[in-house]
Image (cartoon, rainbow, N blue to C red):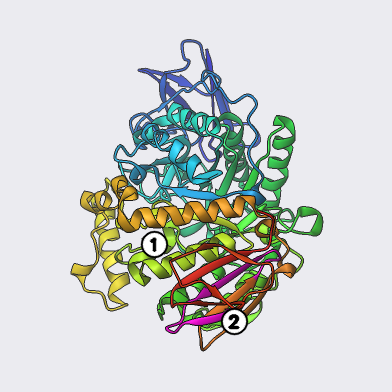
Amino acid sequence: MHEFAVWAPRAKRVSVKVGDRMHAMEGPDERGRWKATVEDAGPGSDYGFLLDGDPTVYPDPRSAWQPNGVHGRSRVYDQAAYRWHDESWQAPPLASSIQYEMHVGTFTPGGTLASAIERLDYLAELGVTHVELMPVAAFAGDRGWGYDGVDLYAVAEHYGGPDGLKRFVDGCHGHGLAVILDVVYNHFGPVGNYTGKFGPYLTSSHCTPWGDAMNLEEAGSDEVRRFFLDNALMWMRDYHIDGLRLDAVHGFVDRSAVHFLEQLSAEIEALAATLGRRLVLIAESDLNDPRVVRPREAGGYGMDAQWSDDFHHALFSILHREELGYYRDFGAFNQLVKALTQAFVYDGQYSKYRGRRHGRPAEGLSAHRFLGYIQTHDQVGNRVAGDRVAQIAGIDAAKVAAGLVLTAPFVPLIFQGEEFAASTPFLYFADHDDAEMAKAVREGRRREFAAFGFSEQEVPDPEARATFERSRLQWQEAGEGRHQEMLDWYRALIHLRRRSAALNDGDLGHVKVLSSEEGRWLAMDRGGVLVLANLGRQDASFEVPEGFRVVVISREIAGMHAGKIALPADTLAVLSSEPE
């Protein structure tokens, strides 16, 4: 016996088809919900809904299992059937985390959650504490970044389906690794989204970069909000996920008295108390608005942390000067200093890229409210060639960047492969089974980069399988030459961060930075740790305070003499006075 339920406020008649049999559903209730109990249905039963006179059988918007893809029937899934082995698990604190962003399809040759389990020993040995999975919700086709998900409750079958994700999370916890899941609540993918057949999930009152906005404030929005809130609760409760990364929250248009993010924060906090587990929410926000991460009690939305694009842009623009897009707003050395000491570079200043003032100061917030990084799926994958920092700026400059990320006051985030300077790109790829959509994506990508002077031949075809295959990590590199050298550097930095009290201090008021715009060097005082970085073309000489010693350095130098240390171009050294 199984009870089926669906929200379809516009429908006059709804049926559920289980196997070959049709069952009329009762409803609608005052909120537009329909239900039916089917005696001979249960886990493993395939089903779908029919609405009014439409003969098409549509998958369940809340389907937990889509074994035959996003256009196929849904299958009943028993969330309680899996036997967990993580009864005493507790995630490490977010403030002390080392996060690692992973795309399941390109992380291993197998491209599945099961094959990713085989690399968990490596991640644990590296010093990673949190694995952040790019979206795994079911999307059209067999390959993609995951941000075109349409069945948000179902795990993509080609990754391993619902049981595959549970085994992966269980395996991570067994290795001492927490799991953050990237979720997309700001839009649906363009192919296979049938929610509009059921109800007003979207509204044309507001336009976003992905089309109509999610309906978070108009008629029917209670059920739409519930759809996303229940989804978040499901991942943490039923899949034992330790936290969510919310994609592009600036895409939410919500003028309700209680903002969606605030409501989500409150419900996740209640779930954490119920489960007795540490749960976190991390936002991607382009707003430079500290309300996103301020506690609800202080008038904020209550997110635990957010990605810090300003830090990335400021650092990358020092490594490699570009004038495209948002990089137009960056390039000065003092902007990197501001990012390190104040989090937001744009906290009320005029932005050339936006043509207006942007942001407000992040006063009174811990640096642990922000994630710092030099590579992410966006910052690599949205480049025409998907090239990485070591390929763009050189291995020595990439080492300096890694050193600044891992000694900065922010929570560090590593993108898969950067720790061994992977030579493989991370390109934009997709597999739309709708020919017209595939053509539109291909041509749109070419037009986008043509505006920046790239020829059609220079833009990889996002729909070609070869584009996806080129993006797979080549793991043999990790033990070879400069790749091994970079991996050793990351291990040393992570080890240093984990045992240093000064490097785990999130008080931005304690971060002191001296720098030279002309010389392109900086000295960052973290208390008992001094970070010296030279990104200029000439040697830079630094005074070494009494009692400090070099603990890690990005490449061999002559050493310290008479209380001074001279660093060649593209070199970083970390000195410490903390007990060994």
Looking at the rendered structure, the kind of residue marked 1 is: Val
- Amino acid type shown at disc 2: Ser
Q: Does the magenta stretch include residue 536?
A: yes
Residue 175 at x, y = what percent?
52, 33
Disc 2 residue crowd, few under 14, some 14–19, many 20+, Cα 10 Å: some
What residue would you read off at disc 2?
A: 515
- Visible residue check, residue 54: no
**Can you identify the residue that label 1 sits on?**
380
Where on the picture, by quarter, is residue 423?
Answer: bottom left
Depth check, front residue: 188 or 198: 188
Q: In this view, does 297 lie above or below 231?
A: below
Count of numbered badges drawn on the protein: 2
For the magenta stretch, what is the residue range? 525-542
Membership of 247 in magenta stretch: no
Q: Is mark 2 on a helix, strand or loop?
A: strand
Q: Position of residue 495 (x, y in %)?
A: 56, 50
Q: Residue 549: horizontal and vertical position, in percent?
A: 61, 65
Q: Can residue 363 be seen in this view?
A: yes
x 26%, y 68%: residue: 446
Q: Which residue is drawn at 47% across and 50% down?
A: 101
Q: Would you place residue 467 above or below residue 451 in this image? A: above
Discs 1, 2 touching: Cβ within 8 Å: no
Find numbered disc 1 in the image and state the secondary structure of the residue it sits on: helix
Q: Which of marks 1 and 2 is nearer the N terminus?
A: 1
User: How crowded is the residue under tag 1: few (<14 C-alpha within 10 Å), some, or many (20+)?
Assistant: many
Q: Which residue is drawn at 56% across and 25% down?
A: 35
- 79 lies above or below 520: above
Q: Is 271 rendered above or below residue 254?
A: above
Left/right placement of residue 46 relative to residue 553 reads: left
In the drawing, what numbered circle is on residue 149?
A: none
